[in-house]
Structures are given as C-alpha cells and as structure tokens.
Amino acid sequence: MEIKTPRRPPYRPPLRRLLLEIETRSECRSRYTEPSPGSIGQTQRAACLVLPAAVQADLERFNAHHPEINVLLASQDLIRNMDVGPQGEVSMPAPAGGRVVVTPPDLSDPNKIDEAIAHMWDNVYVPNPSDQLRDEIQLQAVDLELWMVAALTEMSTQDHSHTLDLLDALSMALGWPIFLTKYQLNVRRPDTRLPAGVEPWLTTPPHASFPSGHACIAQAVAVVLADLTGYRGSLLQEQATRIARNREVAGVHTALDSDFGGRLGTLLGQYAIDAAVRDAERNPRWAMLYARAAAEWVEP
C-alpha cells in the first residue's frame, strides 16, 4: 500500500531534532548506566520547559507565521500537569477530579525481559524486509506523526496547519514522560542479546527500551485525531498499531515495550482532549490550539 504524506511547511519546528536536543540537554544519553531519578526528573522537565538554543531560529520563524500560538507553550500546559514517579508510573489529571496513574508492569525479573527479547528475535523480527517495508519503517522512525495523518487523505498543510501544530505540541509534551520513564526503569534494548548471525538493519536509538515512544505517541495521536475529525478512529488505531509492531519487526523494541507504550499513549491522548475541552481554563494555550485545530474539521 502506497502511503502519501503531506509535506511540512518550512517554518514548522522539526520535532525529532527538538526531542534529541531535550535528550542531549538532560545528559542521559549513556544507554545503560545507572540513572539518578531525582536529578533526571528535574533536568528533564526543565529541558522540556526551556527552549533549546538549537531550535530558537526555527521557532522564531514559526512565530512569524503564527504569532498568536506558540507550539512549545501549548505543550507546556500539558507537561506541567503530568508527573512521573520513581518506578516509572505516569500520572495526569482525571476528568472527574483526582489523578489517573498508569503503572508499568514489574520488570525487576531480568528473565522476563530476556524472554520478551528472545520472542521478538525468534518470532517477529524480519531480517530481510522488502524495500517497501524497509522504507515504511524508516519513514516512521523519522516522523511517525506524518505517517499517522496519512490515514486522513483529505488533510493538507494549507487547510490543516493548526492540526499539524497541535500534533507537534502533543508529541513535545509526551516526550517528557516517555523519556523519563525510560531512564527510571532503564530497560535494555534487544540488541544487547543478539542471536548469532543477526545484524539489525535499523539503527537502535541511544536510550533505554521501555516504553516504546513510537507506540505511545502513535496511540495518543490516533486518539486525538479521531476526536478532532469525528471519524476514521479504527483506521487511525490500525496505523498506530502498525507503527508499534514495525518497531518490533525492525528489532528495536519488544512487545513489552509496545504494549505499555500503547496503553500509556491511549490514556495520554484522552488526557490531552480533556485538558482542552474540560479544563481549558488551566490550559489556555493548549485549549486555544486545540479549538483552532478542531475548527479545521468542521464542515463549511
């Protein structure tokens, strides 16, 4: 199946570059070292709430086109209301008050991780993918949001610029709990237990494995886009599931990573909707951006 994705306008801040800057600034790039949860938590949140110098010019160009909406500030509304505990548990406001807490499974037994890795190599990994599958996975590795919106054939950068901005803000916000949970739990990547003769064809990211950030963001994007558009929820879910599965096919994640990442993303996506619709007063920038994105899907 050929997937045609919309091109990004030149002024939009590159999401992957921003997340890489955040990761670099947090000084957590060493892959399997013992993390310090307290210092990581403080540094990671500070990095997300302070614009990295490397993307200052990009954001200024963006603001020249949309001075009334700042994608980074919209993402900060969501970040400020989330928290990550010492065991990687992610909490967020609940619609009816209180907080929703998403707790990772117990991964203290190394055999559980070893079994998941072995299952992936033996049953899921594709050592010689077709050119089409390889291209698909490599595109998703670079920009999964554009792959998700490919499910909406009528979407364009001209008519849905606020929707694309919203997805950037959402992904920026989700980067914080994803990366902090990774470093709290410090689960090793599958390439630490390579079967004999196996040489992965996709570069393994330089951070811990659990949870899968691609699975989390893809599911959150699916939930938010389904709410904005009012339809195609099942197709968006299929796209999100495919993205998560492809990370296993490429040998960079296990089902443990994908399953929890997807569950976390579903709840974070619903939180993002609630923050805009039911708690707009506490999240004014996010709510404004969400409202403008939603208006792009209203029939004239």
Image (cartoon, grey):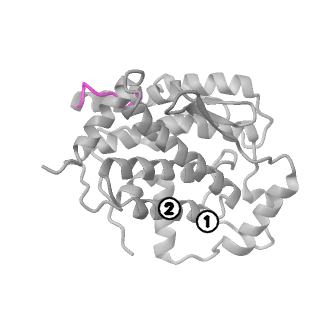
| Picture quadrant where residue 33 is located | top right
Residue in the foreground of this view, choosing between 192 and 161 = 161
Specify the amino acid type for callout 1. Answer: Ala
| Contact check, label 1 and label 2, Cβ < 8 Å | no
Above or below for 151 versus 129? above
| Picture quadrant where residue 128 is located | bottom right
As drawn, is 180 to the left or to the right of 111?
left
Residue 56 position, x and y percent, is 39, 27
Q: Is residue 263 magenta?
A: no
Toward the left, the furthest residue is 300
Tell me if residue 237 can be seen.
Answer: yes
Toward the front, the furthest residue is 96
Q: Which residues are magenta?
A: 66-72
What residue sits 37% from the left and 37% below the top? Answer: 13
**3D distance between C-alphas at marks 1 and 2:** 9 Å
Circle 2 residue: 138
As drawn, is 59 to the left or to the right of 99?
left
Residue 250: which disc? 1
